[in-house]
Amino acid sequence: MTNVTAVTDMTDVKDVTDVTDTDTRRNLDKVRDTATSAVRAWSERLVGLSHSLHDEPETALQEHRSAAKIADLLAEAGFQVARGVGGLPTALVATYGSGELVLGFCAEYDALPGIGHACGHNVNGAAAVGAALGLAAVADELGLTVKLIGTPAEEDVGGKVLLLEAGVFDDVAAAMMVHAAPDDTVGASSLAIGAWDITYTGTASHAAIAPWEGVNALDAMALAHTAIGLLRQQLPPGTLVHGIVTDGGQAVNVIPARTAARYEIRAPSLELLSEVRGRVRACFEAGALATGAGLELRVHGRDFAELRQDPYLTEAYVRAAHSLGRTVTSRQGETLASTDMGNVSRLVPTIHPTIGYDTGGAHQHTPEFTAHGKSPGADRAVLDGATALALVGADLATSAEQRRRLLAGVSRRSSKG
């Protein structure tokens, strides 16, 4: 773990849990001790889960072994497990308890093509499972239903968005997870993001004998890429466009009749994303117009919204992390990459802090970050992340004010239907 100095001091935020007397405080301390002990009791299995996910990385919507490992462990712990929920074969829901207040933990477990768990989802997933196990130990006492939601394809089509659309989050009063990173942070937002799959179709021809008879689909892609490069200067601050060519032709002596690419657009909000998308589309249309190639532009997956982290949950997490000896940096007002947890946060009070460990200076989405995914620091992040999230859940459940707020939110969403 990398300890950092807090930019905004949140470690001294007062405990606003509804505590009126010494006996109540004693009971709350007992609840927290029980939840912490439960995570500790499962620590060997949780670290083993993290390592196993890391050793067998599976990419988006192919996480069959990963989902089964999580489902099997929770079923063994007495959770009711539903597999393949929301029409996604690698999604799952595991619940414990029957209380009115439903607290959700989001488990991610998809890896990146070619570089494995370079975003630390083995840590994310195992920590969410641990949090569910910890809070389950006090669920009956606190009138809770603990809901672990296995959310595939965060690195691709956005499993959480698909599960939102399927109603999996409808009864969830608060949604929580931690994300692996080089340091501990809270409060950041994220960029909204949308993706396209682009295909240009031209006409093949011999590149030496009769190139004039061809329609060069690679030229169309090159023109679009150049136009996007020139457009960047005029894009609003915080807006990004990036992509890769996935098919540039098959033979060097044949005019390419087909090229394909995937591009992503990021912006500070969904609204700005929609505005910028039209300008980027024009660049692809220009490539087709200039060369005579046909253009097919298909939306890839779901748009991710910007992340909105709940202030109370954030404060509760800082207190919990501080009690575990971790120092947390506030990133309030900053944006960190993109996540489909942003879509959840527009519907449900949400927290998405990062949980830090030494990565040798490497950032996510690199092979070097992957290499640290089973380190002692990563193992501690699994257990500390699990414990901190379970403590946030206990905080919410034992605060009459927060219970009212969260249940009222679920009721309002239900009434809107």
Image (tube, rainbow, N blue to C red):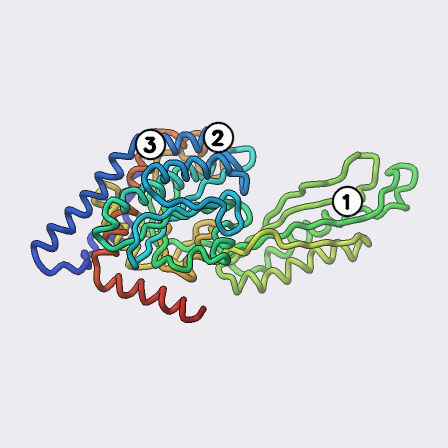
* First in sequence: mark 2 vs mark 1: 2
Residue 85 pos. (x, y %): 48, 49
Q: Is residue 164 or residue 229 the one in the foreground?
A: 164
Depth check, mark 3 against mark 2: the one in front is 3
* First in sequence: mark 3 vs mark 2: 3
Residue shown at 48% from the left, 59% from the top:
268
Residue 290 pos. (x, y %): 79, 55
Residue tagged 2: 56
Within-10-Å neighbours for mark 2: few <14, some 14–19, many 20+: some
Within-10-Å neighbours for mark 1: few <14, some 14–19, many 20+: many
* First in sequence: mark 1 vs mark 3: 3
Residue shown at 40% from the left, 67% from the top:
414
**358 sits to left or right of 164:** left
Work out whether residue 119 can be spotted.
yes
Depth check, mark 1 against mark 3: the one in front is 3
Estimate the spatial distance between the alpha carbons at disc 2 and disc 1, rounded to whole Å: 34 Å
